[in-house]
Amino acid sequence: MLAITGWPLLRSAGVGLRVLRPNMDLPIVIAAGSAHLYSTGAVLLGEMEVYFDVAVVIVFVVSLVQLQLVRCAIEIPQAGAWSNSKLLSPKDRLKLHWAAGGRIG
C-alpha cells in the first residue's frame, strides 16, 4: 500500500539519488519506509506495537501539501499576478500559462 500511495515520492527520491542531488522527498521516503519495515518485522515477530499508520500519515500529509502547492501555482497566474512579472523567465511564464489552462491575462 505504501508503494502505491507514495509512488510519486519514491520516484522523486530515486531520481534525486540517481543524479546525485537528493531532494526533500528522500528523508520523507526514509521515514515512511523505516516505519513500514519496522512494523512488518514487528508483525512477523508477533509484537503488538506497529507503525503502519505513521507511514501512511507521513505520505498523506506530504501528498496533501504538494497538491495544495500545485493548486496555488495554478490559481496565482489566473489572478494575473505573475503574468507580467520580471522575476520569471519567458520559459517559466509559458509553463505557468499552460498550467493555468492558457488563461493568463
Image (cartoon, grey):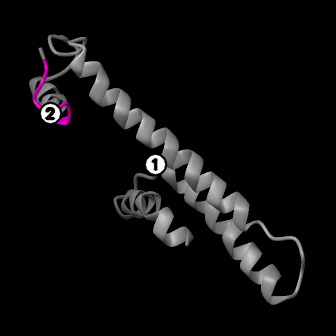
Indicate whether 33 appears above or below 100.
Answer: below
Quarter holding residue 17: bottom left
Q: Amino acid at mark 1?
A: Asn
Q: Which residue is found at the position 51% from the left and 43% from the top?
A: 64
Q: Main secondary structure of the magenta part?
A: loop
Q: Residues within 10 Å of mark 1 (few under 14, many from 20)?
A: some
The number of callouts visible is 2
- Would residue 6 appear left or right of 79 to someone viewing this image? right
Instruction: Look at mark 1 in the image and give the residue it sits on.
Output: 23
Q: Quadrant of the C terminus?
A: top left
Callout 2: SS: loop
Q: Position of residue 25 (x, y in %)?
A: 50, 52
Q: Position of residue 18 (x, y in %)?
A: 37, 64
Q: Quadrant of the N terminus?
A: bottom right
| Viewer can see residue 24 | no
Instruction: Look at mark 2 in the image and give the residue it sits on.
Output: 101
Depth check: give the residue in front, 48 or 10.
48
Question: What segment is highlighted magenta in the picture?
Answer: 99-104
Q: Residues within 10 Å of mark 2 (few under 14, many from 20)?
A: few
| Viewer can see residue 56 | yes
Q: Which residue is found at the position 54% from the left and 46% from the top?
A: 62
Q: Position of residue 95 (x, y in %)?
A: 16, 34
Quarter holding residue 80: top left
